[in-house]
Amino acid sequence: MKKHNFGAGPGILPEEALRKSAQAVLDLNGTGLSLLEISHRSKDFDAILQKAKSLVRELLGVPENYSILFLQGGASTQFAMVPYNLLPVDGKAAYIESGVWANKAIKEAKMVGNTEVLATSKDKNFSYIPKNFSIPADAAYLHVTSNNTIYGTQMKSYPDSPIPVVCDMSSDIFSKPVDVSKFDLIYAGAQKNMGPAGVTLVIIKNDICGKVNRTIPTMLNYQTHIEGDSLYNTPPVFPIYVCMATLEWLQSIGGVPAITKINQKKLQCSMLKLIVILCLLEPLQLKTVQK
Amino acid sequence: MKKHNFGAGPGILPEEALRKSAQAVLDLNGTGLSLLEISHRSKDFDAILQKAKSLVRELLGVPENYSILFLQGGASTQFAMVPYNLLPVDGKAAYIESGVWANKAIKEAKMVGNTEVLATSKDKNFSYIPKNFSIPADAAYLHVTSNNTIYGTQMKSYPDSPIPVVCDMSSDIFSKPVDVSKFDLIYAGAQKNMGPAGVTLVIIKNDICGKVNRTIPTMLNYQTHIEGDSLYNTPPVFPIYVCMATLEWLQSIGGVPAITKINQKKLQCSMLKLIVILCLLEPLQLKTVQK
């Protein structure tokens, strides 16, 4: 039986994707070269990158006016890239604080410019998703975190927003259908749901860049990576390959709706197990008390 | 026979390191988990990270007062991190322009602050390493590029500098012995000489940080990664593993002096082949002319 890692670390990957990735490390498609040795400018890698992009586009229904980027630096780097690119020098950004990751994103935005926290659930240790807040129409964007692994809270719906919405979907991307057109920017570290550590997926509406009058370091500038098609500098070749292989598997089992069903069944099963365990524990506790 | 990639892309890795890395993708040390599935906070990964660091320290003779970091974003991100961390708001930085990579580093530093180009070989398409420049004692640091792949030029010695020296060694690190104590900061994208794309080695003197009065994005701040021991956020687990396996191989063949000898022999062999080819070509050319 396949072992599972129940820690708060990376997710479990499909065995098919792991086998394919291990083989590519030894010899990529019979080329006689390892995936780790090919140029990122080669036809072989271009095919991998384009396949990974087209799978993201198909599986999440990403509209044509969005770019799909594979970047480095994790969601932690996105915490800085978002305000650097989208928060005008004389403007403000709006954030919802729903957990430790949202908190880190806020901390980073505050280093860049005027950042307003519209709502927080810090008062009850982030045990709920903040609701009943009004979104200021004069803010440059609203930043939300879709899922908060540490606290087990998840946004079931997204607010109707008069301003662009940016969403950190690191821990629930590809786990349920999402209407990408409701967001201007989605980002996700790959290691939770779609691949290994070392690559970050960014889905970005093409026309939201270039509107701030700030100097942006080249590598933190989304425009660099949109124009360079994630190839401005050497990309994380192997992590991108594993994402491609994982998404191929996801496509083969029926895409996002299929994985949603599997997750629901697993959840029901876990709940059932929990109830059984609790029922078994109760008499034991009674006995302990009686002693 | 092992195939070789003669493009300007990544280097060829030892077969032993590739075999070990492929096996770790399937099952890491018999744990029943893939290397891609373990937590970066696990004992298994800590052992990999510490081993990779200790191999860098041993093979390059890195003094104890330097930290060894494995970061994301490539040398291109270092081009920004260096001035962000080391160039004071009211200070200046000094750069030597010896090729396209140095040029990119200069462009990025100019976005951050006052940047002086001390010498350039742009006049002759970077066909030589600039010499005979004086280093201003009031600059915060001197930035040099040790090797310029595109032009085939390499610094044979480093200038005696009254100020800290920062060196981009992306394309010749581990190829020859280097006196690390002469530098305050060395950085290198792994994909040329020590591993796959997706990880960048930084060797940094601990006391050079925290001296600039600038707000630095958390992920661009060396202090973040020194204090977090490259684990502030999820690191590129697989690329770090391949570096460890490659450096283990380098250690097993005798370290940097051994690879220097191999490289010299290969160079001599290549030169000999070139001479033979030229000798063979000459009569052919004569014949063509005679025709």
Image (tube, coloured by chain):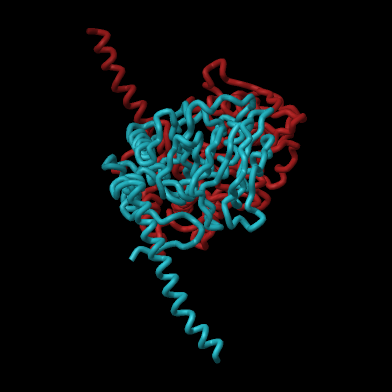
Chain colours: A red, B cyan
> Which quadrant holds residue B49?
top left
Measured as percent of width and height from the top left, residue A88 is found at 74, 33
Q: Residue at x 58, y 55 (%)?
A: B128
- Side (left or right) of A175 relative to A280: right
Using the rendered image of the protein, determine whether residue A143 is visible from the camera's viewpoint: yes
Measured as percent of width and height from the top left, residue A285 is found at 28, 14
Vertical order, B228 against A31 (above or below): above
Vertical order, B41 against B191 (above or below): above
Q: Residue at x 47, y 79 (%)?
A: B281
Vertical order, A280 against B225 (above or below): above
Q: Quadrant of the N terminus of chain A?
A: top left
> Extreme bottom residue here?
B291
Using the rendered image of the protein, determine whether residue A230 is visible from the camera's viewpoint: no
Instruction: Tally the numbered discs.
Output: 0
Measured as percent of width and height from the top left, residue B137 is found at 61, 32
In this view, the residue in front, B212 or A104, is: B212
Q: Residue at x 44, y 43 (%)?
A: A196
> Extreme front residue here?
B132
Q: Residue at x 63, y 52 (%)?
A: B121
Measured as percent of width and height from the top left, residue B105 is found at 61, 44
Q: Quadrant of the C terminus of chain A?
A: top left
- Side (left or right) of A4 relative to A262: left
In this view, the residue in front, A163 or B245, is: B245
